[in-house]
C-alpha cells in the first residue's frame, strides 16, 4: 500500500531556529530520507514554502476567486510530505515516527486511494 | 475460527460470511456423512474455500482477484495445522481490534463483537445504543481496518508493550463499564464483567507470565469476587464496609491474590493494574474497615499516581489519606484537585468532599457538596446512595 505522510509543524518555531539548529534538522532529514530510499519505501517527498506564500482558489458561479493563504489559524502548518510504500499501517506509522519533525510537530498518515478502488 | 479465517482471507466481513456458509454446509453434510475427525479443521477448510469462491464471484477487478487469491493461497499452507496456529490467530485478532488508529469506542465494540463473539444487539445494549447504531459503528471500524491497512498481525517486539497497554485498556474499559455502569438503572452488567475476565484469561494464556496481564487479571478477579455483595436485592449500592463478606467469592479472591503476587514479583516496572490489584488485595484481606492497612494503601496510591496520574487516582488517594491523616488533609487535597479545574463536573469528587466535610462536622457544606454530586450523578443506585447521605445529615430527605 502507499501512504502519504503529511508533516505538520509550527512555522514560527522553525523560523526562529538558529543556523546550527537548522543545520542539525536538515542533517536529520537527509539521513531519514536516505534510509527510506535504501529501504525501498521512497516514492516522493517535498518541503513546502511557508503558509504566507500560499494562495487559495475557488470557482463560484463560474468565476475564479483567488484569496491570500488558507483560512484556518492553526498552531501547526503543513510543511512537507513523504509518499511511501509500506506493507501495512504499522509499517507506515513506524516510518512516520522517524520523521525528524515528529518530535515537535505531528505527522498525519493517510492511505492513498488507488483509482481502481474508487 | 473466525480469527483463522480472517488471517486466511484477509477480510473481516468475508471471513464472517464464509464461516456462516461453512456452518450451513456442515448442517447439511454432517448428518449424512458423519462428523469429520477434526470438525474445526473441516469448518476452516470449507470456510476458506467458500471465501475464495465469494472473492471470485464478487470481484469486479481482475487484478484484485489475483491479489486476494495469491494472499489466500499463501495462507493455505497454514490451514492444515490450524489447531496450532489458532491461539496466534486470536492474539493477532485482538491486536487488530484494539489498534490505536481506531477510536476507543470502536476498539471496545470490535473486541466484544469479533473476539468475544457477542451479537451486535448485545454490544449495542451494553453501550446503550441501538442495534443499528452499533452496526454502523462496526461497519465504519471494519472499513477503516481495510482501507487504512491496519495489519492483522502481532506487533513488532519494539512496540509490543505499548500496543499491549492499549489492549489492556480496552479489556479494563469493558470490565469497568460492567462493574460500575456510567448510566442507567442497574449498577452492574455482569455479562460485561464476565467477558472482560474471559479476555484477561485468554491474554494470560496467549502471553503467559506477563506482569501487566497478570496484574489486570488479578485486579478484575478481586473486584469481581465482591460483586454479589455490592448490590442489595433492591438494587442499592452497598459500600465495602457494609458488605456481607460471606457473599464474597473466596475461590476467586484466592486466585486474584496469587496472581497479584506473581505480577509484583516480576522484575519489571510495576504495572498500574498490579498496583491497583494490590490495593484491592489489602481491602479483601482486612477483616473490617478498622483492620484495613490504610497506611500501606495510601502508599500504594502514591505509587499509582506516578504510574497513572489521573484525577480519579488522586481522589482515591485522598480517601485513603482521610483514613490515615484525617478528613482535613483529605479535603485540602480534593479542593486543590478541584481548583485545577480538571474534574469539576465529576460527581464522585463532590461526593468525596461531602464525606470529608460531614466527618469534620460541617453539615451545611457537606449537604451542598452531596447535592452537587446528586445533580451530576447519572446512575440510579448511586443517586439513591447520595440521597441517603443527605438524609443522614439530619435535615430530612431531599430529592
Image (cartoon, rainbow, N blue to C red):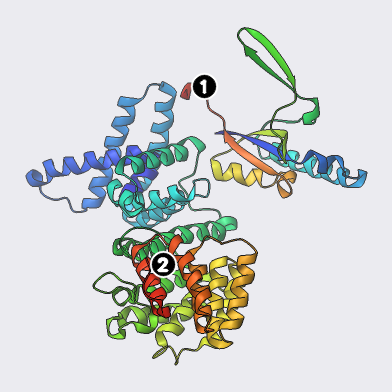
User: From where the camera sits, is residue B212 visible?
Assistant: no
Residue at position x 41%, y 52% in the image: B108
- Give the residue drawn at x 34%, y 47%: B129
| Spatial CA span between label 1 and label 2 | 44 Å
**Above or below, A68 relative to B14:** above
Q: Quadrant of residue B395?
A: bottom left
Q: Position of residue B298 (x, y in %)?
A: 56, 82
How many tags in the picture?
2
> As drawn, which residue projects farthest toward the right?
A19
Q: Position of residue B161 (x, y in %)?
A: 55, 61
Q: Is residue B194 above or below residue B59?
A: below
| Residue A112 location (% of width, % of height) | 56, 30
Q: Quadrant of the N terminus of chain A?
A: top right
- Whether residue B90 is visible to the viewer of this picture, yes or no, is yes
Q: Is residue B105 left or right of residue A46?
A: left
- A44, B337: nearer the viewer: B337
Give residue B391's position: percent from left, percent from top: 38, 75
Q: Quadrant of residue A34?
A: top right
Neighbour tally class for label 2: few under 14, some 14-19, many 20 plus, Cα within 10 Å = some
Q: Residues within 10 Å of mark 1 (few under 14, many from 20)?
A: few
Give residue B253's mark: none
> For the view shown, which residue lies furthest in the top direction?
A62
Q: Chain of mark 2?
A: B
Q: Secondary structure at mark 2?
A: helix
For label 1, the SS is helix
Residue depicted at x 69% and y 17%: A57
What residue is pinned by disc 2? B204
Chain letter belonging to callout 1: A
Q: Residue tagged by mark 1? A: A115
Marks 1 and 2: same chain? no
> Residue at the front extreme?
B395
Amino acid at each position: 500500500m502507499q501512504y502519504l505522510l503529511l508533516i505538520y509543524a509550527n512555522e514560527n518555531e522553525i523560523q526562529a531556529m538558529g543556523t546550527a539548529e537548522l543545520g542539525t534538522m536538515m542533517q536529520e532529514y537527509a539521513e531519514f530520507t536516505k534510509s527510506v530510499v535504501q529501504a525501498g519505501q521512497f516514492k516522493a517527498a517535498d518541503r513546502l514554502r511557508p503558509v504566507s506564500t500560499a494562495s487559495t482558489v475557488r470557482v463560484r458561479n463560474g468565476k475564479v476567486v483567488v484569496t491570500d493563504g488558507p483560512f484556518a489559524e492553526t498552531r501547526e502548518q503543513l510543511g512537507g510530505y513523504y509518499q511511501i510504500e509500506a506493507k501495512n499501517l504499522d509499517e507506515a506509522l513506524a516510518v512516520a515516527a522517524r520523521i525528524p519533525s515528529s518530535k515537535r510537530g505531528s505527522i498525519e498518515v493517510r492511505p492513498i486511494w488507488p483509482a481502481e478502488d474508487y | 475460527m473466525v480469527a483463522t479465517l480472517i488471517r486466511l482471507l484477509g477480510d473481516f466481513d468475508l471471513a464472517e460470511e464464509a464461516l456462516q456458509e461453512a456452518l450451513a454446509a456442515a448442517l447439511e453434510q454432517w448428518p449424512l456423512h458423519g462428523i469429520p475427525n477434526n470438525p474445526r479443521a473441516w469448518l476452516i477448510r470449507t470456510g476458506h474455500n467458500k471465501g475464495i469462491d465469494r472473492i471470485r464471484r464478487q470481484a469486479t477487478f481482475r487484478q484484485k482477484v489475483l491479489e486476494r487469491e495469491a494472499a489466500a493461497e499463501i495462507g493455505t499452507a497454514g490451514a492444515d495445522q490450524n489447531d496450532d496456529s489458532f491461539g496466534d490467530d486470536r492474539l493477532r485478532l485482538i491486536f487488530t481490534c484494539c489498534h490505536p488508529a481506531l477510536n476507543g469506542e470502536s476498539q471496545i465494540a470490535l473486541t466484544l463483537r469479533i473476539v468475544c463473539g457477542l451479537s451486535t444487539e448485545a454490544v449495542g445494549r451494553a453501550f446503550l445504543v441501538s442495534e443499528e447504531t452499533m452496526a454502523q459503528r462496526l461497519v465504519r471500524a471494519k472499513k477503516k481496518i481495510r482501507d487504512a491497512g491496519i495489519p492483522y498481525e502481532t506487533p513488532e517486539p519494539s512496540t509490543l508493550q505499548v500496543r499491549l497497554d492499549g489492549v489492556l485498556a480496552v479489556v479494563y474499559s469493558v470490565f469497568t463499564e460492567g462493574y460500575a455502569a456510567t448510566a442507567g438503572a442497574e449498577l452492574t452488567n455482569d455479562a460485561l464483567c464476565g467477558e472482560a475476565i474471559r479476555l484477561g484469561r485468554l491474554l494470560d494464556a496467549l502471553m503467559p507470565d506477563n506482569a501487566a496481564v497478570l496484574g489486570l487479571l488479578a485486579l478484575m478477579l478481586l473486584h469481581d469476587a465482591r460483586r454479589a455483595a455490592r448490590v442489595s436485592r433492591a438494587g442499592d449500592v452497598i459500600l465495602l464496609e457494609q458488605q456481607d463478606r460471606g457473599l464474597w467469592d473466596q475461590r476467586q479472591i484466592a486466585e486474584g491474590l496469587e496472581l497479584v503476587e506473581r505480577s509484583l514479583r516480576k522484575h519489571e516496572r510495576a504495572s498500574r493494574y498490579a498496583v491497583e490489584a494490590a490495593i484491592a488485595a489489602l481491602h479483601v484481606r482486612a477483616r473490617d474497615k478498622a483492620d484495613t492497612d490504610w497506611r500501606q494503601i495510601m502508599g500504594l496510591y502514591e505509587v499509582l499516581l506516578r504510574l497513572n496520574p489521573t484525577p480519579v487516582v488522586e481522589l482515591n488517594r485522598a480517601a485513603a489519606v482521610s483514613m490515615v491523616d484525617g478528613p482535613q488533609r483529605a479535603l485540602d487535597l480534593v479542593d486543590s484537585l478541584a481548583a485545577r479545574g480538571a474534574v469539576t463536573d465529576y460527581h464522585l469528587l463532590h461526593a468525596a468532599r461531602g464525606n470529608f466535610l460531614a466527618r469534620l462536622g460541617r453539615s451545611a457544606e457537606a449537604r451542598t457538596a452531596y447535592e452537587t454530586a446528586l445533580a451530576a450523578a447519572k446512575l440510579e443506585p448511586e443517586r439513591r446512595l447520595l440521597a441517603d447521605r443527605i438524609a443522614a445529615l439530619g435535615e430530612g430527605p431531599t430529592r
